Each structure stands twice: as structure tokens, then as C-alpha cells.
Amino acid sequence: MRQISVWCPDWPVTVARLETGAPDDAPVAVVTANRVVACSHTARAQGVRRGLRRREAQARCPELAVLNRDEAAEARAFEPVVAALEAVAPGVEITRPGLAGIGVRGPTRYFGGETGVLHALSRGVQDIPALHGADVLIGIADGSFAAEQAARRGQVVAPGGSPGFLADLPISTLDPSGASPLIDLLGRLGIRTLGAFAALEPRDVLARFGPDGAWAHRQAGGRDDRPVSGRRPAVEFSVTLDLEPAVDRVDTVAFSARGIAEQFVLDLAAHGLACTCLELQARSENGEETVRRWRHAGVLSVVDVLDRVRWQLEGWLSGPGRPTGGVDRLVLVPVETVPTGVHQRALWGGTGEDDERAVRALARVQTLLGHGSVLTPVLEGGRDPGQRTRMVAWGDEPLPLRSPEQPWPGQLPAPAPTMLLDPPRPAQLLDSARRPVLVTERGGVPSPPVLFAMGGERPAAITSWAGPWPVDERWWSPESARRVVRCQVVDVHGRAYLVTGVMDGDPHWQVDAVYD
């Protein structure tokens, strides 16, 4: 198995320099768990090696810049390199960020030989901005292990020459980190080179060192016949229906769309997927378009897809913004998919026919009355119940704009009220002298609340209350700053309320929510 290996030396160091802005000529070491995992050429020249502890590496090179490893950044930075390689030779196998392999057989047929492939790969990666001048070495040999060693040395090993090429390499080549017990054992047994290890009988190696030893023995002898397992480009699951001539009847379009609906569902199923949310795009012959996303409580079948085609076209072709011509194109695009057999919970928490009817009814209402006619709540981050709830159109992605996981100083404690008033109702929160309750800037209550009334009701006695919880809103802007306090009160009738008081200017209170 002839293979090409593309290697970016000291890739963790290259990425760490890009992330931190360290100079190119400075000695740099990248550490993980307090040990060096990669170092620059300048650092190696001063005795820094992989596997050293941080303090030992700094003792050998006092001016050493020690940087933490960021594997996610390494993967992101290597992606443009892989994309450039795939543009030349599809089917790139990523061993790790900084090292990739390519099968030789396909590219050599196109470029006329291994030399042509090398030139094409070199041209493909030489102008990548992500490399920022970093070296890229390419090698060819039989097997991935021999190809990697050839890339480290910038060589092309002749077919059948991998065993001889590997023979004189030190046994530590099998594990440069030096952490493998097998390499340590082989060294203590006097086996110093890959050739000496490869000369042992495979049966004896398996009996003495087990499967790991047998695998290392095949690598040392250049007998790695595993083919490259290149990543495959993403499969395009979108389907398109072109109608000629254009059609202005919903039933005719839906009848014509059955074929692409079946193709849409079957293509996903062939890859072990099912669609839970699709985007339906329709275009008229005069260029008008309608685009809408449809979410399903379970997974979309062919009938479900056709229903949504009908509903969207009925609302578009008969609504106030109807197009001036017939429909000439229909596109189905999967937005969210799940593995086949994974069924999302239905709208009401079940999976029966009632849930399906509810979903169909809501989709029908949304089609007839507009996209925002059916709303669902989304939990968000905030300090009061009004801020923590946002309504989104049914079928849209229920993503919060403010993360509920972040700390929110001044957040109302549990329990949450059961009913929010929109808009809030004016209220009276009075002390024993029937004056509005005031809260100082330090959160003190000189005269505690005694009476409460909502709207024009007669004030009732308060049996218990909690708070206040002060919040200085937009304190950085004098024009819009507000000093707000919140309290929970329970009257003699057993009714509990969440009241908010604005203490700036003329203090006043309002009821934001009611507790059950």
C-alpha cells in the first residue's frame, strides 16, 4: 500500500505561537499536565526534549517560553491544510492535527506518477495563510508508518524499500514520547533498531509481547498494509423539483412533489438518518420566493413532507403576498437530522395519535394565520420572570438569546410564579401609615409593608412578605438607569404576588406575576 504522508513539524508549537503571538525565533515549549509535548527547534538546540517536566525544561533553557496546549485550536488551524490536500487528492486521512495521509493509487493516475502528485500537493499547501510560514514535509513509502517517517525526513522511498529504510532507525521511533512500556522493555533487552526488532520471528513476538508487540513488529518491518481511511465529503441531502411549465395549483404541485419527498426521506434513511426539521423553499416563475422551516415532533415521513408542501403553498398562493406567477421550483433542505430509530418526544410528552393531530393542527393554523401565530416559550437568562421567558414562532429553533446557565446577580429566587401579567398591573404597597413603601439605596426598608392592593381594589392586610431584592439597572447610563426592587407578598386571602417597585423619582409599585 503506497501512501503519502504530509507532516507539519512541531504543529502544537506553530499553533501556540499563532494564538499567543510569540516570536518565531524564541525557544518555545508546549506543555500538557506539566510535561513538554512539543518544542521548537531553538528549544531543542538548548536541550529541551519531549516528556521533560516544565521545571527541568526551564532549567535547561532559562529563556524558554512555556505555552499551554490547545488541541481545539490545533484542529481548527489544520483544517485549511486538509481542505487544500483534498482539493488535490480526495480521501485524506487525518492521523492527528499536523499529520495527514493520502493513498497514492488514485492521485498518481491523474497526475501521471508520484512526482506529479508531490508537485501538486506542494503547490496546494504553499500559499495557505493558516501556515504562516510553517514547514510542510511530504514523504512517500509503503505503509502509513514508513510514509510518516519518510515525511519527517522529506524522502520518497522506492516501492518495496520500506523495510530497508526503517531498519537503521532507533527503536524509539515507534513511540517518540518514550512513555511506552514496550519500547522500554525492548531497549533493556538490547534491541536498539527497528531492523533488529523486525528480524525476530512474528510468532515469537506475539507470544512474548502480545498483540501490541505484534502490531509494533509489523510497523518496524514495513508491513503495514492498512489502506488509508480518508474522510468522506458531506453528502448533499437537499432535493430539488423543477416544474416546467410553472404550476399555480397546490394539489398539482403536491402531486408532482411526491417523488422528491420519497427521495428526500429514502436518501436520509440510506445513511441511517431521519429528518426532524426541514426547510422548504418555493420559487415562482417571476422570481418571488417563500422559505419556511418546519419542525416535527417526531421524524418526517413522506406524508408529513407532502402535508407541509401543501400547507406552505396554500398560505403563499392564496395569501395577501401571493406571487404573480406559478411555482417553478421546489427545494427540500434537511435542517436537523437524528439517527434512524431515535424518536424525539412529542409535543405533549407522548407519541400517540393525539400528539400527531395536535402537531398537524398547529402547523395548519400557522400556515393560515402567519408564521408568528403559534408561539412556544423558551427559557432564557434574566433576573425576573419576564426577562427569563421569550416566545418564538413554533417550528423555529428554540435557542435562548441569553444563556440561563450564567450567573445573574439579583436574580429572583425560587419558587417561580405561575402566571405572568403582560402588561404589569399597577399596585399599592403601603406601610402602617398608608404611605408607599420605600427602599433605601442599601436595600433597607424603614417602614415594612402592611397593606397591599392591586389596581383599584381595596387594600388588604399582608400576612407575610420576602425581600426586597434590589437591582440597579443600566447604572452605566444616566439617561436610562433605574433602581428597581422586587418583593414577594401574601395577603390575608392567601394570594401571593411578585411586586416590583421603581424607586427613582416618584416611587411606585406594580404587580408582575401571581403565585399559585
Image (cartoon, helix red, strand yellow):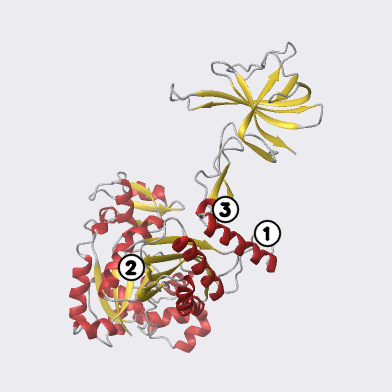
Tag 2 secondary structure: loop
Mark 2 or mark 1, which is nearer to you?
2
Hey, what amino acid is under mark 2?
Glu
Residue 156 locus on image (x, y percent): 22, 78
Alpha-carbon neighbours of circle 2 within 10 Å: few (<14), some, or many (≥20)? some
Q: Nearer the viewer, residue 97 or 457?
A: 457
Q: Nearer the viewer, residue 448 or 377?
A: 377
Q: Residue furthest top?
A: 433
Q: Measure how far apart labels 1 and 3 are at the Cα level.
A: 15 Å
Q: Visible in this render: residue 287? A: yes
Residue 188 locus on image (x, y percent): 44, 72
The residue singled out by tag 3 in the image is 374
Residue 497 locus on image (x, y percent): 71, 31
The residue singled out by tag 1 in the image is 348
Hey, what amino acid is under mark 3?
Val
Q: Nearer the viewer, residue 440 or 456?
A: 456
Disc 3 to disc 2: CB gap under 8 Å = no
Residue 216 locus on image (x, y percent): 43, 78
Mark 3 or mark 2, which is nearer to you?
2
The residue shown at (47%, 84%) is 205
Q: Nearer the viewer, residue 216 or 114?
A: 114
Vertical side of 94 occupied by 502: above or below: above
Disc 1 to disc 3: CB gap under 8 Å = no
Hey, what amino acid is under mark 1?
Trp
The residue singled out by tag 2 in the image is 285
Alpha-carbon neighbours of circle 3 within 10 Å: few (<14), some, or many (≥20)? some
In terms of sequence position, does the residue under pointer 3 or pointer 2 come before the other? Answer: 2
